[in-house]
Amino acid sequence: MWHFECHTGGMAEDTEFAPGAGPTSGVSVTLTAGTLQAIRERVGRRGVSAYLERAAQRQIERDSLDELIAAFDQEHGPADPEAVAVKRAKLTGQASAAGAAA
């Protein structure tokens, strides 16, 4: 569980920044002991903030991608699983099940 309290240090509340941009702001984050321990084992005590910043940016990217996919699906319908498998095989350099059968 994460709990955030944002301390803007006098920064205007209506100023908008893209993820990863703008001045830094302090927050209070509550994590389970196991999660915090795992983070510290990976990056040390001084790397926790940077690690959480990168994790938050990745989650924002994933959320945005999920929203884009949902909008596409709503407009065009879901993707054809066979077409996805063929494109995935091209991207990964593996033979697809459809290509192997041909």
Image: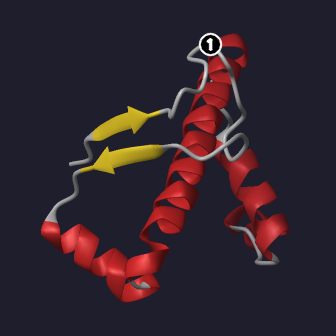
* Relative to 57, residue 44 above or below: below
* Relative to 68, residue 89 above or below: below
> Dot 1: what SS?
loop
- What amino acid is found at the position of numbered circle 1 in the picture? Asp
Determine whether, in the image, residue 74 is placed left or right of residue 28: right
Q: Position of residue 12 (x, y in %)?
A: 61, 19
Q: Where is residue 47 in the image (x, y as percent from the top left)?
A: 48, 76
Q: Residue furthest front?
A: 10
Q: Which of 100 and 51 is in front in this view?
A: 51
In the picture, residue 32 is in which quadrant? bottom left
* Relative to 74, residue 82 above or below: below
Q: Which residue is rendered at x = 58% and y = 44% of the image?
A: 62
Q: Which residue is rendered at x = 22% and y = 51% of the image?
A: 30
Determine whether, in the image, residue 37 is placed left or right of residue 24: left
Q: Name the residue under label 1.
A: 14
Count of number-bearing discs: 1
Q: Which of 82 and 16 is in front in this view?
A: 16
Q: Residue furthest left?
A: 33
Determine whether, in the image, residue 79 is placed left or right of residue 4: right
* Relative to 13, residue 87 above or below: below
- How are the colours assigned in the image? secondary structure
Density class for disc 1 (Cα within 10 Å; few <14, some 14-19, many ≥20) is few
Q: Which residue is rendered at x = 34% and y = 87% of the image?
A: 41
Determine whether, in the image, residue 62 is placed left or right of residue 29: right
Q: Which residue is rendered at x = 64% and y = 37% of the image?
A: 65
In the picture, residue 7 is in which quadrant? top left
Could you tell me which quadrant the C terminus lies in? bottom right
Q: Look at the image and tell me whether residue 53 can be seen.
A: yes
Q: Nearer the viewer, residue 57 or 10?
A: 10
